[in-house]
Image (spheres, helix red, strand yellow):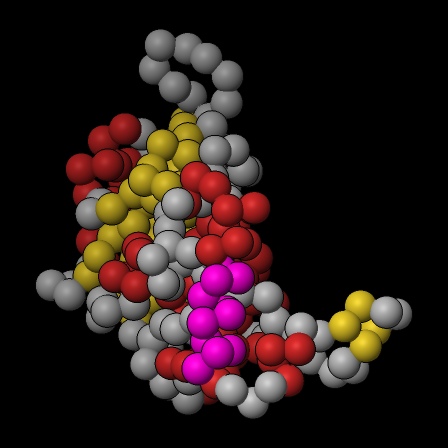
């Protein structure tokens, strides 16, 4: 999968791309991630990318020209252009599963007070990672890339995510335990030590429902 990120702050991605699963996926050539500073596509002096809003108001607004020019430079027939903003569709695991099937994703990271409304005419999808406002789209882009990348074939084992939260009937994951069996009087449930995999699977399914009922009733 190829991913292009249009951002004014490419250095924010340095640690994200150089650690853990993302780094290994890049090294294996399962992912190609390019950071593109769309300031370079501005035709104004000093590569200005923002300006004051028509009608007045606080803050600065991203101009159409540099962002749209950058999108058109990297876009292909296989591309999906994604705008990250608080007004977008609430991002969920089902979207990650869909986007992991794409060949080329382009993430547009806004900044400042917002962007010229006409930029929306040049994107395919809009997503928000929550009902709050951040200083820019870089962190949401990292969140989405991380959630999508782990679903790309070969990045991690399929068995590692098939039982994750939201993967089965939108339930949360079941509780997991490891050694020691007894930690300060808190013991591993005996069923997990039984060796009866059919009963263990049934228990895990029941616990997933209990977890969801207790923590995220809205998912049921």
Q: Give the image location of residue 89, x and y in percent.
A: 32, 40
Using the image, determine if residue 72 lies above or below residue 192.
above
Say which quadrant the N terminus sits in. Answer: bottom left
Between 188 and 168, which is closer to the camera in this rendering? 188
Using the image, determine if residue 91 lies above or below residue 209.
above
Q: Give the image location of residue 184, x and y in percent.
A: 88, 70
At x 37% / y 63%, what residue is drawn?
Answer: 167
Using the image, determine if residue 212 lies above or below residue 146.
above
At x 36% / y 32%, what residue is drawn?
Answer: 87
Res 101 visible: yes
Say which quadrant the C terminus sits in. Answer: top left
Farthest-out residue, top: 55
Res 47 visible: no
Between 147 and 118, which is closer to the camera in this rendering? 147
Tell me where residue 18 sits by quadrant: bottom right
Q: Give the image location of residue 205, x and y in percent.
A: 45, 66
The answer to whether 96 appears left or right of 111 in the picture is left
Magenta stretch encompasses residue 70: no
The answer to whether 171 appears left or right of 178 in the picture is left
Tell me where residue 42 sits by quadrant: top left
At x 37% / y 55%, what residue is drawn?
Answer: 170
Between 164 and 202, which is closer to the camera in this rendering? 202
At x 15% / y 65%, what residue is drawn?
Answer: 78
Using the image, determine if residue 82 lies above or below residue 190.
above
Which SS does the magenta portion mostly show?
A: helix
Q: Give the image location of residue 111, x and y in percent.
A: 47, 38
Total residue callouts: 0
Farthest-out residue, left: 77
Q: Which residues are magenta?
A: 198-208
């Amino acid at each position: 999968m190829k991913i292009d990120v249009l951002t004014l702050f490419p250095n924010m991605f340095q640690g994200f791309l150089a650690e853990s699963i993302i780094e290994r996926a890049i090294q294996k050539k399962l992912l190609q991630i390019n950071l593109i500073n769309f300031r370079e596509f501005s035709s104004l002096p000093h590569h200005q990318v923002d300006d004051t809003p028509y009608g007045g108001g606080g803050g600065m607004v991203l101009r159409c020209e540099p962002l749209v020019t950058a999108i058109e430079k990297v876009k292909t027939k296989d591309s999906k252009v994604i705008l990250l903003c608080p007004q977008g569709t609430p991002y969920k695991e089902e979207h990650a599963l869909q986007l992991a099937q794409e060949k080329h994703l382009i993430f547009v990271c806004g900044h400042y007070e917002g962007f010229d409304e006409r930029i929306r005419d040049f994107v395919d999808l809009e997503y928000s990672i929550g009902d709050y406002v951040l200083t820019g789209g870089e962190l949401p882009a990292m969140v989405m890339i991380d959630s999508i990348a782990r679903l790309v074939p070969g990045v991690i084992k399929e068995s590692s995510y098939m039982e994750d939260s939201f993967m089965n009937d939108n339930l949360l994951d079941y509780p997991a335990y490891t050694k020691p069996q007894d930690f300060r009087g808190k013991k591993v449930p005996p069923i997990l030590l039984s060796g009866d995999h059919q009963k263990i699977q049934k228990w895990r399914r029941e616990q997933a429902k209990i977890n969801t009922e207790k923590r995220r009733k809205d998912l049921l």
